[in-house]
Amino acid sequence: MNTLLQRPEWPFLVALAVGLLIGAERERRKGDGAGRKPAGVRTFTLVALLGGACAALGLGPLLLGAVLVGALALAGYALGDRSDPGFTAEVALIVTYVLGALAHDRAFLSLELGVVVAALLAYRTQIHHLVRDTLSEQELLDGIAFAIAAVVILPMLPNRALDPFGLFNPFTLWRLIVVVMALSSFGYVAQRLVGVRFGLMVAGLAGGLVSATAAVAAMAQRSKAEPALAGRAAAGAVASLISAVIYMFVVVFAVDADLLPRLAPALGAAAAVLLVYAAILGRLTAAGHDGGPSGRAFDFPAALLFVLIVAGCTVLSRLLSGAFGEIGALVGAGATGLADAHAAAASMAALAGSAKLDDATATLGILIGLTTNMLIKAPVAFALGSRPFAWRVSLGLALMLAALWIGHGVGVALGW
């Protein structure tokens, strides 16, 4: 294979493949009779090979070839059937020439782009239906806004703390906004694909693996935008907590698996209670609103408010750590848990694994960190969501924390 890639014929083979691929799609679209399009599989294949040959000969032939292909495309447009005023065939011809030229230096990139171009042409009916009929104008605007936030703004931000205390990293905070927007959009799309009854639950389970707090915030936004979905949004939020507990099992296992027997009763009881409670919420709201989602895919002001809450909790955790000094790892775990329960768990497990902390204290620190982290989710639910949503989520949190500490007490009593 490596020998083939080094042969001078290889770029021309790629150009030939790109031309055949795009040309085959165009051949099926050109029609029959007097009104058929002028360019088909042979024309596109020859144009791709022309691009590869001109690129091999140098800049002058490459520019000359581009002028000739451009003139050919204009002539085809002028002489063709004007009942369809679109430029798709003409632009595709020019793109095929460019991809053929690109194959001279970047063969694989040319082939990849050729596949994408052929797919865009082949699925044009489905794409038109998606843009014109399926997507609303607001959904399209939300998609563009998300792309700006994630692709344009995020890479431009400095990835370092700008304050003297090292608390506020613009990149990290904006990334959290993007995560909330993405999770909210995921829940919106899940509703469109599988319906409201199961869509929010699926979104919650997936979102909890990224950030349960962000998932709760996203579900809260959905409950406020569509009050009829408060119960199902709450079920999705509770489902995210289940994923967060499972994630904690994985984190501790990766750092110090010896702690798992001590944590199993507490985390297992918490996960079981959350699972039952989420199922009850889903059943109780099964007969309610079951249409597709309305409103917006996400609420940017609500996402910004969520990040401000997280930043405030981070400041509080630092103040607590400073006030208590080195009074103990448990206070540190609780303060860290305000911002990230999994970070607190990893820290405690690492201390236990290095014999700097006994297993019992490390286990207690992990549970304290998880508890403080769960407590954050109640104000997030009340600040961003509807009251019915917030009360249902808060009840779930209370049941989970009760099960967590009862499970821990049982484990301690049994000598685990």
Image (cartoon, helix red, strand yellow):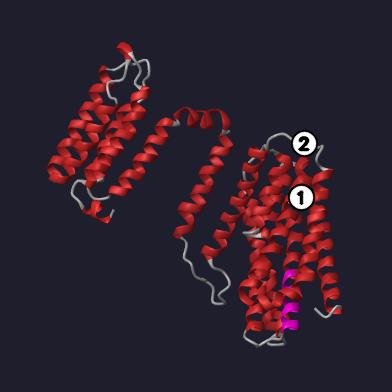
Is residue 388 something that shows in the picture?
no
SS under mark 2: loop
Residue range corresponding to the magenta coloring: 359-370
**Which label belongs to residue 345?**
none
Is residue 11 something that shows in the picture?
yes
State yes or no: residue 366 in magenta: yes
Q: Position of residue 333 (x, y in %)?
A: 70, 77
Q: What's the residue at 17%, 36% (across, down)?
A: 65
Q: Position of residue 97 (x, y in %)?
A: 25, 37
Location of the C terminus (image quadrant): bottom right
Left or right: 284 in relation to 346? right
Mark found first going from the N terminus, 1 or 2:
1
Q: Position of residue 298 (x, y in %)?
A: 62, 46
Residue behind mark 1: 235
SS under mark 1: helix
Q: What's the residue at 66%, 78% (across, down)?
A: 349
Disc 1 + disc 2, Cβ < 8 Å = no
Q: CA distance from mark 1 to mark 2?
A: 14 Å
Q: Quadrant of residue 197?
A: top right
Q: Quadrant of residue 228?
A: top right
State yes or no: residue 4 in magenta: no
Position of residue 258 relative to residue 208, above or below, is below
Q: Please, what is the three-letter code of the amino acid marked with disc 2?
A: His
Residue ranking furthest to the top: 34
Position of residue 263 relative to residue 151, above or below, is below
Main structural element of the magenta stretch: helix, strand or loop? helix
Q: Nearer the viewer, residue 384 or 391?
A: 391
Q: Please, what is the three-letter code of the amino acid marked with disc 1?
A: Ala
Q: Position of residue 28 (x, y in %)?
A: 37, 24
**How packed is label 2: few (under 14 Cα within 10 Å), some, or many (20 or more)?**
some
Q: Nearer the viewer, residue 100 or 140?
A: 100
Residue behind mark 2: 289
